[in-house]
Image (cartoon, rainbow, N blue to C red):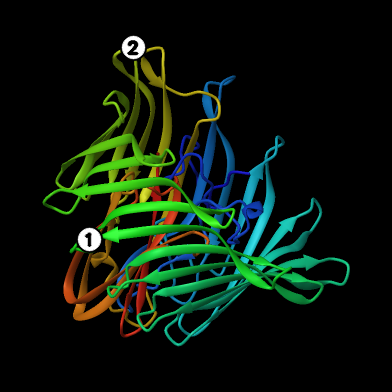
Amino acid sequence: MRATLTLALCSMALTITNPLSAQQSLWKNPFKKERHAPGNNLWQTSNAEKSTATASRLIAAAGGEYDDNSSAFIFIDSAFVNYSGGRGGDLNSKQIKFDNGMMWVDNGGGLQEAEKMAQTFDGNSNILSTLLEAWDGTAWVNSYGIVYTYDVNNNTLTETEVEWNPGNNTWDSVYRYYYTYNGNNTLLTETGLTNNGGIWENAYLTTYTLDGNDNTVVTEWSGWNTGTSSWDPTARLHYTYNTDNLQTELWDESWQTNTWQKHNRYLTTYNQNDLPATETRQSWDGSNYVTARVVTNTYVNNDLVNALEQYGNGNNATNVDNTFDGNHNMLSRINQYWFNNAWVNDRKMEWTYNSYNQVLTDKMFRWINSAWGHNGGDLTNRYYYETYTTSVKDAEIAESAFKVYPVPATHFVRVEMEWEQPQAFTVSVTDMQGRMIRTFSEKATANYSRNIDVNQLPAGNYVIKVAGVKGKATYQQFSVVR
């Protein structure tokens, strides 16, 4: 089910689209299991609030899908959220910390109630619980939930997924996740457990090996062997970095018949501005790595305006052209493929933004009969915001001074920020299930910028977290499109 968000009191245009990816859902259950349909997360926000600052927060959205019969976008879903406590959030936030919200969907007979969600918070505005209700046609019934605990640095220690048991009217714990960190608040381990008849049993383990700069040099996944009561390795990633702590090499392996089997390797070179210049994917043929694809990037004002992908033999494969506004917001993205010695247009996305650089609309196009048009299934969304004055205690990064761009990203994201006072900090990238992907440990500074390679990440949503040694953290969500 695809979802978006709208305010019941608003009059809304229906020709609109999801700002992060036209294949992803804004309204999602915030749970780890794929059966809970991860995607764009409306239920998330930043910790970077400032007590006297004016900010803009997402309150509603509406979504449409193109209908071939009527040759128009048809309204298919909507939602809204309410806030208190000076909290807020938008599509670039890790968590939108609303108190409650509701979603409607069109199941063929007009908009109908679908889901409600409520959240509770601690004194640091950390989410303590998130509970979801579903409409069964006559009444709201409890459905799913998740409960969190935190350490003194506001790092998540545990997450427990719960499901409603209608037989005895109780919440049953079904999955639990434990996290450990080093002294720099960098994730070291993630352990997943399942509840079997009231007994927690190990399921999987992810470990992160770090270098002296807190860069992840090995990520390894293991599964629990009930026969031997031990962890069996399943897969791992290796990383290497240059002197600027930029990733230059990544290769993956899987555990097969008591040995590690190589698969793919990814090599990255950088230009003078530390932006990815070339990105090469190689495959293992049993004895050597063989180049499969090479991407060459072109920038204007540090914005990725062109990405040319070629096969290992030098033949053209795909091409991407992007345009940006003066604030590095992506305005359009055109995908092309090489056919009969010529570039052929395939798909296009377009975005608009408000004065806070928040996405207002996005829309999908296809190349049809020598012109850009729409086919059945193309998506569009429209987002609504309100300004508010934050009332939470001061954070150490002003939200206006923390930038992540381009959004959406293809090959890299650039992180820029200004600390109110110099301090050491860590920068980490996680997926929407909280799994660590990259982490960097940075020396004390007041002004900071870094380009993070995301060329090997699957399309989807990710979160960048910046955590100072004094315990404060702020987040920005970004998406990767292919």
x, y (%) of residue 420?
20, 78
x, y (%) of residue 191?
58, 71
Considering only order in the chain, which callout, 2 or 1, is on the residue closer to the N terminus?
A: 2
Q: Nearer the viewer, residue 171 or 256?
A: 256
Q: Nearer the viewer, residue 415 or 369?
A: 415
Residue farthest along the left direction in this orientation: 272
Quadrant of the drawing holding the N terminus: top right
Q: Give the number of the disc on residue 147.
A: none
Dot 2, crowdedness within 10 Å: few (<14), some or many (≥20)?
few
Report if residue 357 is visible in the image: no
Residue 99, by quadrant, is bottom right
Type of amino acid under label 2: Asn
Query: Label 1's element?
Result: strand
Residue farthest along the bottom direction in this orientation: 152
Query: Label 2's element?
Result: loop
Q: CA distance from mark 1 to mark 2?
A: 40 Å
User: In this figure, which residue is indicated by the disc labeled 1?
Assistant: 450
Is residue 280 placed above or below 50 in the rendered structure? above
- Residue shown at 26% from the left, 48% from the top: 268
User: In this image, 104 relative to 10: left or right?
Assistant: right
User: In this image, 91 relative to 129: left or right?
Assistant: left
x, y (%) of residue 379?
50, 35
